[in-house]
Image: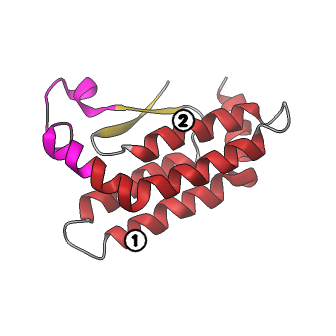
């Protein structure tokens, strides 16, 4: 199973994952311009890394992992997600959806399209989420 995951990740990286990973990292750099944006920027770099190699990884709520509510999973996290959505989230989601449609044209590209749709949903509300390995 690990070999198949590696093959899919390499194909993903070559066929569009690299472009969207760079888009996430660019959004992270823009977030680092202000002090308030630093938590958003950190999340961008973590999710950008997941965007480079998405097979075998998933994003879940930090509340599910830790069992407690923190700053990002509460009301401030919701406010942060609204701000994120308006500034960056919608554009990253559109990028992932466009890539998903391009990948879904062929049968071989359907798993890649599903990963893009998963990342499009994550790009709408990334605050309060964490990346975990499926293994």
Give the residues in magenta: 61-80
Disc 2: CA contacts within 10 A as few (<14), some (14-19) or many (>=20): some
Circle number at residue 5: none
Q: Is residue 124 left or right of residue 53?
A: left
- Whether 109 is drawn above or below 29: the answer is above
Circle number at residue 118: 2
Assign a secondary structure to mark 2: helix
Give 73 or 55, whichever is nearer the viewer. 73
Give 51 or 106, whichever is nearer the viewer. 106
Residue 63 sits in quarter: top left
Q: Mark 1 = which residue?
A: 29
Q: Residue 47 at x, y = what percent?
A: 44, 49
In the image, what residue occupies the spot 36% across and 57% down?
86
Q: Quadrant of the N terminus?
A: top right
Q: Residue 13 at x, y = what percent?
A: 68, 51
Q: Is residue 106 left or right of residue 99?
A: right
Measured in 3D between alpha carbons, the distance from the residue under mark 1 to the one under mark 2, in whole angstroms, is 23 Å
In the image, what residue occupies the spot 30% across and 58% down?
40
The answer to whether residue 74 is visible is yes
- Whether 67 is drawn above or below 95: the answer is above
Q: Earlier in the sequence, mark 1 or mark 2?
A: 1
In the image, what residue occupies the spot 57% across and 40% down?
54
**Could you tell me how many numbered marks the image carries?**
2
The answer to whether residue 43 is visible is no
| Colour scheme of the picture | secondary structure
């Amino acid at each position: 199973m690990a070999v198949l995951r590696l093959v899919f990740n390499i194909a993903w990286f070559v066929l569009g994952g690299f472009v969207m990973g760079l888009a996430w990292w660019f959004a992270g750099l823009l977030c680092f311009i202000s002090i308030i944006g630093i938590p958003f920027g950190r999340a961008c770099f973590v999710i950008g890394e997941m965007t480079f190699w998405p097979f075998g990884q998933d994003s879940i709520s930090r509340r599910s992992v830790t069992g407690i509510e923190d700053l990002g999973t509460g009301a401030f996290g919701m406010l942060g997600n609204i701000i994120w959505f308006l500034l960056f989230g919608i554009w990253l989601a559109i990028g992932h959806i466009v890539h998903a449609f391009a990948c879904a044209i062929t049968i071989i590209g359907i798993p890649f399209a599903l990963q893009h749709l998963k990342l499009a949903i994550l790009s709408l509300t990334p605050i309060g989420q964490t990346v975990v390995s499926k293994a």
